[in-house]
Image: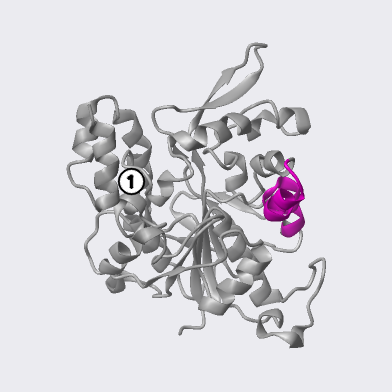
Amino acid sequence: MPSRWLLPIASLLMLATSVIPAQVLAANTYPIVLVHGFTGWGRDELLGFKYWGGLQGDFQEELEAQGFTVYTAVVGPFSSNWDRACELYAQIKGGGARHSMGGQTSRMLTQMLEKGTAGTPVEEDPSSHPLFEGGRSWVHSITTISTPNQGTLLANGISTFGDTAIDLLGGYSPLGAAEENAWVTTLEDVYYFSYATMDTHSTVDWLLRKISLPNILTMFLPLDVFSVFLGSRYGSNNGFSTDWQPNDGLVNTISMAYDSTGKTLKYSGSSQIGTWNIMAQLSNMDHTSVMGITLLTQVLDLYSAHAKLLWGLPETSSRRLTDSGDDEAATVTGAILALNAAASRMKSSENLQSLCSNKANSFAEAYCNNLLAD
């Protein structure tokens, strides 16, 4: 097993249309590890319905067919980030790509690998376990997808239901995330990438106050009630600006970009180590669509493009800013633009029938049959 890994998070890594074997142009061949978010599941659970792929197939197998080395981790669906980080270490001892809470988990694991538990509320004895020793620079990059890097106000709202909810979601609240970010830092030798999703539009309430509401044509229906809460005046009434209103149904979009303390750079073809490289926003995409739990937008090309970008990162870099190849940068940009344009084309049943013409699995077939039923 290589000494350095790629850790993507609650989110994803990807390429687009090139069929050239990935190894031919790779600057590194570190494995890509997919880490699920809160309430997530493994490859062999939920009757085979893939967390990474959903209605669109099996992203791990698709990426492997393109030449990438990909693994899917399984951690506690309701565990704290600390417990999940320990579980992740036991499975992979390295890195990967994370979606939602998976991003926070991966960042915490990487911090402990390099620095041990220094700065945590309760520091562990370094001699008690190898994970707590520090000194292990095993993670080359972290990619967070729809991750509440600064927390989600949904955790605040749900936590009002009692101590159990607080115990489960405390680390996902803005306060809990800030406490974790105080010691889970942006490390100087790790590349950070973040993808933010948004599926709301701005409007006003009956008092002409700014709010955000879900896009009814593209947001997964069960997320609507959470999206309405996140886009309401709840945040404004509790000290948060209206910038926290746009969301993807589970997480405030503003929270996904970075941890609020690290350096940032809008990605435009160059990747900077020790910095949050913020990718272009994915619009009209909710928290589940980026996992493939929709047919409105096909996201595999984005994962493929990002995987190609990651494998193009140098193993070591004498410069902090690394230019991506023209092909990698154009492929990632093209994949993002294609996703952002896809939802706007969904205007008729004929459009839906076209999407359903090549169903990836039985789950997609059932989904299409229900949608197209008279």
- Give x and y (percent) for residue 235: 71, 32
Q: Quadrant of the C terminus?
A: top left
**Range of residues picked out in magenta:** 161-180
Q: What residue is shown at x 37% (from left), y 49% (from top)? A: 292
Q: Is residue 165 magenta?
A: yes
Q: What residue is shown at x 30% (from left), y 69% (from top)? A: 64
Instruction: Identify the residue under disc 1.
Output: 334
Question: At label 1, which amino acid type do we have?
Answer: Gly
Tell me: 251 left or right of 170: left
Say whether residue 328 is visible.
Answer: no
Q: What residue is shown at x 25% (from left), y 52% (from top)? A: 362
- Give x and y (percent) for residue 1: 45, 85
Q: Is residue 70 above or below residue 205?
A: below
Tell me: 9 left or right of 69: right
Tell me: 128 left or right of 6: right
Say whether residue 196 is visible.
Answer: yes
